[in-house]
Amino acid sequence: MPKLTETFAKKLPHANSSTDKYWDVEVKGLVLFVGKRSKTWYFQKDVGGQTKRILIGRFPIISAQAARQTALGFALEMGRGAGKVAQIGAPTLEAAMDLYLARPKLRSENHKSGTRAQLERHLKDWMRLPLDEISKAMLVRRRQDMAKTPSGANHVLRSFRTIYNHARRTYDLAECPTMAIEWFEETPDGRIIGDLKEWRQTIDDLSNPIHRVFFEFLLFTGLRKTEALTLQWKQVQEDRIHLPMTKNGRSFDLPILQVHHEILAPLRPLSRQWVFPSPKSVAGHITKPERIKFNPHMHRRTFATVAMEAGVLEEIVGRLLNHTPLSITGQRYTRPSLDALRPAMEIACKEISDRIEH
């Protein structure tokens, strides 16, 4: 039996007919099923004369290292050793991150890629360290290294805490070392665009027409920056914009009007897929909008502020922004229809247009 490493798994050819099975020589119970189109990790063990098989996940979404650590965790839970369990111990930060990000119900793909990029940037030198070797002192020093961006530092520590606590469900780990760390105070950026005539002039002065449309579209929809940047034409329907997965972990339909179609009209011929295309971007769409005086989130806050000042109820504005309701009832049952939200969108867009023109 081979040791199921990342390299070994990559080189395995797909099966021609039936599924091929490869067992790990070190971690008892870890098996890689190789079919015609996919490679899948499982943990398999005979218990009481019956074979129990637990899905770990697809390769390469789940790396070999992450699969090995998961299999070791399952072995511990079933009360028997698995070869080198005691010697391997806690998962590395990289393995724990892979396991956490592989959860099928974890928000959106943008959230997953953003979390990975954030940790690989700020905690790159810790990725191969076992979680139980990352101490409070190390976190305090890293926090100080990021002191110039307090919000960003807090965000990194929160992501680390989430991944660590997720690993505690499987591994025997002490409390997360962030428990006793003092967080930076964050001052919310509540700025809005106070003068929409100035905004109009700033947007008109942009040399790239795609960026001009991007900022105008943000102002008239209240969408988050990433939601707009990654928008595809198939999501733009006659009466709505459909977002299959959003920041709060569920799909969302935003009612749109004729004004939104008019804003986007100049971009229709540019790409069959992306609403805001960029030939220079590997992703195929704009990833970094041009820097202007008014940042993207100011557009979202301005949309909300103008809507409420025009008489739209705060709760309805929250629904247009796809905020998660505070009440349990609101979270589980209440999802207003497009027809219920459309009048609020009409009021908001009319008020924004009036303030730009007058």
Image (cartoon, rainbow, N blue to C red):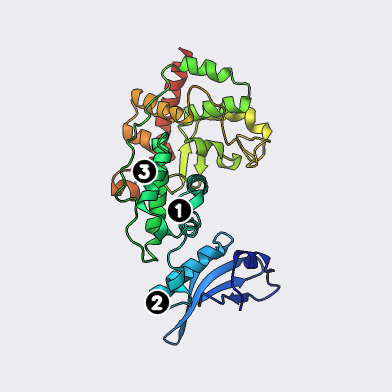
The reply to whether residue 246 is in sight is: yes
Q: Amino acid at mark 3?
A: Thr
CA distance for labels 2 and 3: 38 Å
Q: Which residue is mark 1?
A: 106
Instruction: Give the side of residue 145 with respect to residue 177, left or right.
Output: right
Question: Which marked residue is nearer to the observer: mark 3 or mark 1?
Answer: 1
Sequence-wise, the earlier of marks 2 and 3 is 2
The reply to whether residue 240 is in sight is: no
Please name the residue shown 34% across and 27% down the image.
308
Decide which of 176, 53 is in the foreground and name it. Answer: 176
> Which label number is shown at residue 324?
3
Q: Can you give x and y, in whole percent of width and height, for residue 71 in the image?
A: 48, 71
- Position of 182 relative to 7 (above/below): above
Sequence-wise, the earlier of marks 3 and 1 is 1
Mark 2: secondary structure: loop
CA distance for labels 1 and 2: 26 Å
Sequence-wise, the earlier of marks 1 and 2 is 2
| Disc 1 packing (10 Å; few <14; some 14–19; many ≥20) | some
Mark 3: secondary structure: loop
Q: Which residue is mark 2?
A: 78
